[in-house]
Amino acid sequence: MVSALVSIVIDCATARTEHLNIAWVEGFAILMAVVVSSNITAYNDYIKERWLMSLNDVARSRKRVSVWRNG
């Protein structure tokens, strides 16, 4: 995210006057790609954690049965 912000600043600072209104686009695209990717990863981790917690609840709710073999 820092490099995207640096890219925006550098592109806006070094752009010619006729391209100044679109100089921020590349850095903004990088920034949005990072934000979207991070949010999707966080959502997937959240769903996996909820699934694991439900499996743990099922495992805790089952009775423990001792099995004796040959003895």
Image (cartoon, rainbow, N blue to C red):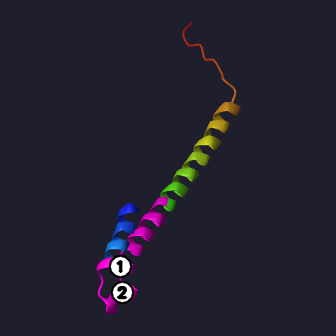
Q: What x and y, as percent, mark residue 68?
A: 59, 13
Could you tell me which residue is drawn at 40 percent across and 74 percent down? Answer: 29
Could you tell me which residue is drawn at 47 percent across and 59 percent down? Answer: 38
Q: Is residue 30 above or below residue 56?
A: below
Between 60 and 48, the residue placed more toward the observer is 48
Amino acid type indicated by mark 2: Leu
Could you tell me which residue is drawn at 67 percent across and 31 percent down? Answer: 60
Dot 1, how many residues are within 10 Å of its Cα: few (below 14), some (14-19), or many (20+)?
Answer: some
Q: Earlier in the sequence, mark 1 or mark 2?
A: 1
* Bounds of the magenta segment: 12-38
Q: What x and y, as percent, mark residue 24?
A: 39, 79
Q: Which residue is mark 1?
A: 12
Q: Is residue 19 above or below residue 51?
A: below
Q: Is residue 58 above or below residue 1?
A: above
Q: Are marks 1 and 2 in contact (CB under 8 Å)?
A: yes
Between 10 and 51, the residue placed more toward the observer is 10
From the viewer's perspective, is 38 left or right of 27?
Answer: right
Q: Main secondary structure of the magenta part?
A: helix
Dot 2, how many residues are within 10 Å of its Cα: few (below 14), some (14-19), or many (20+)?
Answer: few
Q: Which residue is mark 2?
A: 20
Could you tell me which residue is drawn at 39 percent across and 61 percent down? Answer: 2
Q: Quadrant of residue 6?
A: bottom left
* Secondary structure state at the residue bearing disc 1: helix
Quadrant containing the N terminus is bottom left
User: Does 31 lie within the magenta span?
Assistant: yes
User: Does 27 lie within the magenta span?
Assistant: yes
Number of disc labels: 2
